[in-house]
Amino acid sequence: MTRAAARDLYDVHNMIKNNLIKDEHKVHLRKSIIFYFVITSNNVDKGFNLEMIDRINERMIKRDLKPVLSNYDPFNLKEAKEVVKNYLFNLMNFTDDEKKFIGYFIQNQYEPAVLFDNEQVLERIKDHPMALWRTK
């Protein structure tokens, strides 16, 4: 969502089109997107910006994507943008706890248990170096 890469748009579009993200995994996907957004974004307080997808143009597709695609791949940029933006818009309806996690992070407080309740996930990310560094 933040780097506006043609190959990312292609991959996400195909994941959606081929229904690779099952409904039971969408909550975890949203939480993972939130987590990685806050630790990598310089503008967490400005929220998610799906407009970055609009920066992908035919020139980028021709330069960065077409060389790695089969000649028979009928990639449609306009359709891919619409499908991905719609999917992400619907996916990114935050719960109160997700909003709280982002708010804490903006205030330089790293509270992963507010975002995740899975003990295995929490164990893996409790000392995440980038999250700790960003909130230091």
Image (cartoon, helix red, strand yellow):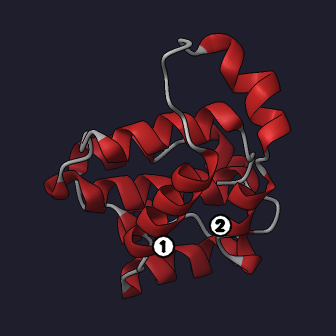
Q: Is residue 88 visible?
A: yes
Give how far apart the Cα atoms at labels 1 and 2 are: 8 Å
Q: Is residue 14 above or below residue 52?
A: above
The amino acid pointed to by label 2 is Leu
Tell which of 130 and 72 is nearer to you: 72
What is the number of the mark on residue 89?
1
**Where in the figure is residue 44, as x and y percent of width and height?**
72, 69
Tell which of 61 and 105 is nearer to you: 61
Assign the C terminus to one quadrant of the image: bottom right
Assign the N terminus to one quadrant of the image: bottom right
- At 23% from the left and 49% from the top, the residue drawn is 119
Tell which of 28 and 114 is nearer to you: 28
As helix, strand or loop, the secondary structure at mark 2 comes to helix
**Where in the figure is residue 87, as x and y percent of width and height?**
41, 64
Asked which quadrant contains residue 18, the reply is top left
- At 49% from the left and 16% from the top, the residue drawn is 72
Q: Is residue 80 above or below residue 91?
A: above
Q: Which residue is mark 2?
A: 50
